[in-house]
């Protein structure tokens, strides 16, 4: 009879658990910071934020490092990430009641980074292209593309030289 009670209570707990949305403070930039938050009514500690093999918890005390900070107040838990890396783009959350959440971070210029146009996140990486057109005048066009991951911006400038 005890086994039956245990199985019924386990099924009840699993049935009451739900999946919730994790919100991101804004579009993130590689090597920049971001805050994730989740709100669940009657959230209970311990709460755990996970990425791959990394776990950041809030039980009696909350994780409070230089790179990651977890806070928990009432029905809301937050995770602050100091340096977003390509290694940890998917985060999961769970609380004591088996309520869960999952998010794939929204990263600005991630495709540009993966294509190799941004080889050094956070640093400017110039790319040059030369175009030559011949006609009555020889036209040489120099195009300079510079990207900055910290600012998530791209700069394009073009110089045109005409020769007779």
Image: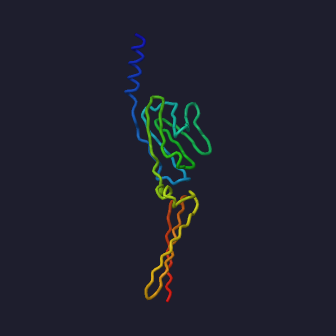
Q: Is residue 125 left or right of residue 109?
A: right
In depth, the one of 151 and 89 nearer the eye is 89
| Image color mode | rainbow
Looking at the picture, does residue 156 appear above or below residue 6?
A: below
Which residue sits at x=51%, y=33%? 47
Q: Most extreme residue toward the right, as rendered?
A: 66
Q: Most extreme residue toward the front, as rendered?
A: 134
Q: Most extreme residue toward the top, as rendered?
A: 1
Looking at the picture, does residue 109 appear above or below residue 60?
A: below
Image quarter where the N terminus lies is top left
Which residue sits at x=49%, y=55%? 114
Which residue sits at x=48%, y=29%? 96
x and y percentages locating residue 36 in the rendered image: 49, 44
In depth, the one of 119 and 100 nearer the eye is 119
Looking at the picture, does residue 133 appear above or below residue 60?
A: below
Q: How many marks?
A: 0
x and y percentages locating residue 88 in the rendered image: 52, 45
x and y percentages locating residue 146 in the rendered image: 53, 66
């Amino acid at each position: 009879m005890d086994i039956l009670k245990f199985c019924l209570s386990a099924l009840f707990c699993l049935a009451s658990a739900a999946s919730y949305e994790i919100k991101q403070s804004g579009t993130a930039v590689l090597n920049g910071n971001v805050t994730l938050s989740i709100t669940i009514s009657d959230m209970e500690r311990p709460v755990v934020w996970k990425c791959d093999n990394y776990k950041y918890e809030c039980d009696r005390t909350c994780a409070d490092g230089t790179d990651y900070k977890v806070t928990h107040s009432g029905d809301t838990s937050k995770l602050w990430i100091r340096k977003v890396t390509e290694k940890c783009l998917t985060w999961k959350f769970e609380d004591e009641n088996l309520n869960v959440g999952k998010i794939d971070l929204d990263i600005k210029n991630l495709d540009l980074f993966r294509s190799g146009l941004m080889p050094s996140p956070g640093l400017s990486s110039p790319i040059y292209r030369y175009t030559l057109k011949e006609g009555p005048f020889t036209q040489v066009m120099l195009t300079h593309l510079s990207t900055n991951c910290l600012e998530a911006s791209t700069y394009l400038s073009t110089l045109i030289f005409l020769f007779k």
